[in-house]
Amino acid sequence: MPTTIQEIDHRYGDHIHVLNHPFAASLLTELSQARCIQPTLGQLVTYCYSSLLAHVINREFPLCTLKVETRMGKLHPNSPLTDIVCRKDQRVVVVNLARAGTLPSHICYSTLNYILNPEGVRQDHIMAARQVDPLDRVTGSTLGASKIGGTIDQSILLFPDPMGATGATIVTAIDHYKNANLGTPLKWIALHLIVTPEYLRKVSDRTPGLQVYAFRVDRGLSPKEVLQTIPGSQWPHERGLNEKGYIVPGAGGLGEVLNNSFV
């Protein structure tokens, strides 16, 4: 039976969008397994982010009506193509949260250059690393070097980062932009493959206005009775992070596997 892309029923709030997307779910199931390594892993991430970006563009980007002459214009000059498209003058900043976000950021940046005015599409780079205690438990995120290309005023800021685990990295990155006084963006949007209830709570509390899109919310360490309820309806009792800050069932450390660098 055909399925229309929509969001799953949840109680996390209207700013959270967990998609019901069988195509992406099929790819995500494959790439979550330990046997999936490069180069297959990179290709599956590319397909997933191409689909996720398309959905975000359809839902969040300003549109306009465009009339153009097609290749048939010489034969039929009075029958131009008229359609609703993305406004080409919309400015977008894609933020590379290295290292797991490097490939997703490149996919989004490259795609947007085809449908928008390339002069208004920018890719910034932020190096952020987890802070951990002596037991390897995540305590926060440390911002390293960054390359920020200028104003973000009236731009759409995209944060493509596969795993929304603790929320520490994206909160630190957004705070960095806000503290730099670079202007007021039109929208803040996070694009994830998988998120946890803990991540959703942190970004909801710390980054008001952030729109979150994901294909999956993992809460595999929640009590069995909680797993039988609508996601978010028992939010305080939902758990998707293990003691070291990795998502369960999750997909492991995608930054490690994508780069074949296990440090």
Image (cartoon, rainbow, N blue to C red):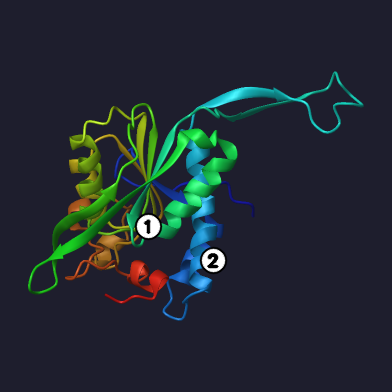
Q: Would you say 178 lies left or right of 137 here?
A: right
Residue shown at 35%/67% (left/top)? Answer: 255
Say which quadrant the C terminus sits in: bottom left
The picture places residue 13, in percent across and down from the top left corner, at 30, 40
- Earlier in the chain: of badge 2 and badge 1, it is 2
Residue 250 in sight:
no
Amino acid at the residue labelled 2: Gln
- Residue 101 image label: 1
115 or 208: nearer the viewer: 115
Dot 1 alpha-carbon crowd within 10 angstroms: few under 14, some 14 to 19, many 20 or more:
many
> Is residue 150 or residue 260 the one in the foreground?
150
Q: Residue at x 23, y 46 (%)?
A: 203
Q: Is mark 1 on a helix, strand or loop?
A: loop
- Quarter of the picture containing the N terminus is bottom right
Residue corresponding to mark 2: 43
Q: Viewed as shown, does residue 182 lie left or right of 122?
A: left
